Image (cartoon, grey):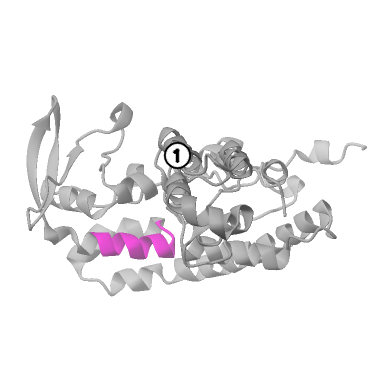
Amino acid sequence: FISAENAKRWFPNITWLVDTYHFCSSKKKDNVLVKSFGPRIWQIIATDMRAAVYAKTEEECLEHIRAAIEKVQSSQPAIDKIVYWQERRNNWALYKRNRVKGHQNTEGPYVEQNHASLVAVAGDDKRRTLEDNIVDVISRTKLILQKHQDFDYKWQAEAQLDLQRMDASRRGDLEQARLRLCKNQYEFFVTEYDSRYSYNCNDEIVDGQEGTRVRHSSNSNEGYFIPDAGVNGVGEVCPCETEQSDACGCRHFCAKRVHRKEPVFCLENIHKRHLFQIELPVEKASSVQVDETFLFEDNPNALPAAAPAAAAAAPA
């Protein structure tokens, strides 16, 4: 209902997610690809096309698409349709979304609900203009952000009470996480933190790099080697899928930190989208001085600084 080009223009900070349920799920008999190919052709190529959707790289995606084409060599219309979707793979293939740190592997009910909500507000109706859809989406987003802001104020107000309820040891490990993370991510971080004792840690040197090997207590696999310094010497990055996809501070990282007797919460390892942000008040330019360096470097969500009073008073 809003093309990718228009969405990038009007909503430059948008995060693209894939609603795989409506697009290609076997549980939805009238998904997008079924409607595109028809039930007979879709039954032949479904496995390959779904594999293309979930491919981790573009090369793997194209390989599955070629396999689908091989299965319908006798039908030029079916091949043409596959090529049509192949040319638009950047709009539906998960490998594209997985290039965005902090948003990798995002799908499932969360995406489906967001999709359904957007369609309910600005449906795919040819009688609606682009302007109608954009205005409705902006209005919806404004209401959602206001609800989030109200929720965040409450989350901030309850922080000290939550910390007082913890014993000293737990408070020492989780205090910064409680103060810096938004509610959902904090609850996830606590779950990972509470799982740390299920892992054994041994310091090792791998390819000349010092670090720690973190294995599950069952010793069922090789575990994960977490180097002492990550890319460009900043951050200790666990190679597990959870950490690579969400950048949130996984259980293996918590286990390593406890093993090293280091602070469990490490701000360098947390993606900025997980951090709790306080909205800056908006005031008239004539009554406030704004440090633009602070706004743009320390608070990526802040609005541009207010113009000087003299500029505001200048004739149009």
Residue 159 part of the magenta-drawn span: no
Residue where numbered disc 1 is placed? 61
| Near-viewer residue (305 or 72) | 72
Residue at image coords 53%, 55%: 42
Residue 84 x %, y % = 62, 40
Q: Is residue 296 above or below residue 199?
A: above
User: Which quarter shows the C terminus?
Assistant: top right
Residue 57 in picture, x, y percent from top left: 41, 37
> In the figure, 65 relative to 257: above or below?
above
Residue visible at 18% across and 48% down in the picture: 257
- Residue 307, compared with residue 180, is above or below; it is above
Q: Main secondary structure of the magenta part?
A: helix
Q: Amino acid at mark 1?
A: Cys
Q: Residue 207 appears in which quarter of the rendering?
A: top left
Residue 248's x, y, as percent? Answer: 35, 51
Find the residue positioned furthest to the top: 208
